[in-house]
């Protein structure tokens, strides 16, 4: 049985923090599916096709990683792709409280699912997609916050 993990998120855009979590998780799993959630009630800043392309570019040399989009419950997506793990990164204690409640709800919905948390390394703790979007929206240089592989897209 393969150890398949889903790393769900909006990745609007992917940050160096996301990249770091994923790279550190690669040795733990046979496959990691980076799952970009589509929420019809929420307007994204960057187009989903761009986000997919950026993530595929960042991990082009890692055969254990694939990128997919989905809508609906993450646990339903996990069932479809036969994943037994949900991967999440934690930056702060507030992240932990939020993610713990989601993880416990997911466990109730799908008892076979395990949520695996990786702590963000200290240099990436202040980075999140909302800040990157705000910097970009106001004409700032976001390159220090996003993976090197996608600098030419910005």
Image: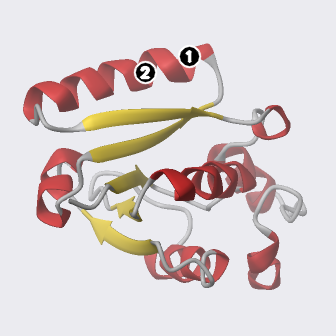
User: Label 2, on which residue?
Assistant: 98
Residue at x 28% of width, y 35% of height: 114
* Crowding at mark 2 (Cα within 10 Å: few <14, some 14-19, many 20+): few
On the image, the x and y values in percent for residue 34 come to 43, 63
x%, y% of residue 56?
55, 80
Left or right, 88 with respect to 101, comes to right
Of residues 153 and 30, which is closer to you in this image?
30
Q: Is residue 139 left or right of residue 60?
A: right
Instruction: Give above or below for 111 relative to 69.
Output: above
- Disc 1 residue crowd, few under 14, some 14–19, many 20+, Cα 10 Å: few
In which image quadrant can residue 5 be found?
A: bottom left
Residue positioned 89% across, 58% down in the render? 144
Q: Considering the image in quadrants, where does the C terminus appear?
A: bottom right
* Residue topped by disc 1: 94
User: Residue 93 sits in which quadrant?
Assistant: top right
Which is more toward the observer, 116 or 36?
116
The image position of residue 152, as x and y in percent, is 81, 85
Which residue does the image show at 62% across and 61% down from the upper left? Answer: 14
Mark 2 touching mark 1, by CB under 8 A? yes
Identify the colour scheme used. secondary structure
Which secondary structure lies at badge 2?
A: helix
Q: Is residue 11 left or right of residue 139?
A: left
Q: Residue at x 63, y 83 (%)?
A: 61
Q: Which mark is residue 121?
A: none
Quadrant housing the N terminus: bottom left
Location of residue 12 with respect to 105 vertically, above or below: below
Q: Secondary structure at mark 1?
A: helix
| Quadrant housing residue 81 | bottom left
Disc 2 versus disc 1: distance between alpha carbons?
6 Å
């Amino acid at each position: 049985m393969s150890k398949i993990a889903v790393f769900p998120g909006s990745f609007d855009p992917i940050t160096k923090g996301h990249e770091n979590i994923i790279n550190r998780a690669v040795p733990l799993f046979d496959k990691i599916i980076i799952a970009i959630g589509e929420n019809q009630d929420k307007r994204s800043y960057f187009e989903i096709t761009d986000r997919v392309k950026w993530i595929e570019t960042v991990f082009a040399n890692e055969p254990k990683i694939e990128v997919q989009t989905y809508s609906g419950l993450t646990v339903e997506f996990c069932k479809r792709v036969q994943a037994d793990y949900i991967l999440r990164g934690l930056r702060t204690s507030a992240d932990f409280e939020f993610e713990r409640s989601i993880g416990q709800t997911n466990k109730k919905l799908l008892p076979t699912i395990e949520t695996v948390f990786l702590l963000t390394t200290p240099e990436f703790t202040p980075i999140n997609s909302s800040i990157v979007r705000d910097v970009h929206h106001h004409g700032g240089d976001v390159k220090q916050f996003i993976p090197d592989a996608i600098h030419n897209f910005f």
